[in-house]
Amino acid sequence: MDVRRAGERYRGGDPAAGIESLHAFSFGPHYDPDNLRFGALIACNEERLAPGAGFDEHPHSHTEIVTWVMEGELTHRDSTGRTSVIRPGDVQWLSAAGGVRHVERNDADVPLVFVQMWLTPREPGDDPGYEVVHGIADSTPYAVPRAGAMLHVRRLGAGERTEVPGAAYVYVHVVRGVVGLAGEELRAGDAVRITGAAEDVEMRGLTSAEVLTWEMEG
């Protein structure tokens, strides 16, 4: 079990343009050969966009992109003609497949905070895919079969317990609140990487908390 604290994340983005980024993995100009990926996961970025700020049209390929909004609302537009507004509690999935371009902006008048996670597909190619699940319920798993991965969203009350899924790779990211896991106290922005079957490992809410957990194949 490898604990990574929020303060260890690499700071990026463009603060002058209203973009602040915190990266959990080697990303962009920050190259760390010992932190390229964990299972299928190659990025877990916390993005903060000021009102009116955003990422202009840019390309992706051979990447499964899952986005979770923490505060505010995210406007998404892509080269397939889709336009969506993603709010807290929604899961957005974009499969770049052979290639797609998109725009991500904060068109609201309040700050936007979201977590975006990139996964590598098991096979290259295929057609781009897109889906938004609005208001996903607590404990409802969200499958990303192209990456052999499953996302679990948990909203824990203080004292509430939940089992960590058993899988070859498990990645736990604390969105808000404080949780206890295997003797570690984890706060917002902290993450845990677990290899091997995580059977009989429990997570407990030390306060009310929201946690994203990835279950990934070997």
Image (cartoon, grey):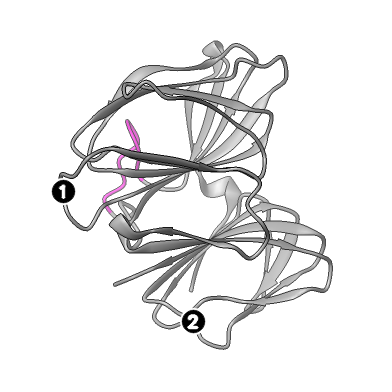
Residue designated by label 2: 198
Q: Amino acid at mark 1?
A: Pro
Q: Residue at x 34, y 53 (%)?
A: 35
Name the one closer to the observer, 213 or 102: 102
**Magenta-colored span:** 26-33
Q: Is residue 80 left or right of residue 73?
A: left
Mark 1 or 2 closer to N-term?
A: 1
Alpha carbon of mark 1 to alpha carbon of mark 2: how far? 29 Å
Q: Is residue 99 above or below residue 198?
A: above
Rendering quarter of residue 19? top right
Q: Main secondary structure of the magenta part?
A: loop
Q: Is residue 115 left or right of residue 94?
A: right
Q: Is residue 135 left or right of residue 14?
A: right
Q: Residue at x 22, y 58 (%)?
A: 122
Residue 74 percent across, percent down from the top left: 58, 27
Q: Amino acid at mark 2?
A: Ala
Residue 13 percent across, percent down from the top left: 47, 25
Q: Nearer the viewer, mark 1 or mark 2?
A: 1
Q: Residue at x 67, y 51 (%)?
A: 188
As helix, strand or loop, the secondary structure at mark 1 comes to loop
Q: How many marks?
A: 2
Crowdedness of circle 1 by 10 Å Cα count: few (<14), some, many (20+)?
Answer: few
Q: Is residue 53 magenta?
A: no
Residue designated by label 1: 124
Q: Is residue 104 above or below residue 43?
A: above
Task: Indicate the quadrant containing the C terminus: top left, top right, bottom left or bottom right.
Answer: bottom left
Q: Is residue 32 magenta?
A: yes
Name the one closer to the observer, 117 or 36: 117
Q: Which mark is residue 147?
A: none
Residue 213 percent across, percent down from the top left: 54, 62
As helix, strand or loop, the secondary structure at mark 2 comes to loop
Crowdedness of circle 2 by 10 Å Cα count: few (<14), some, many (20+)?
Answer: some
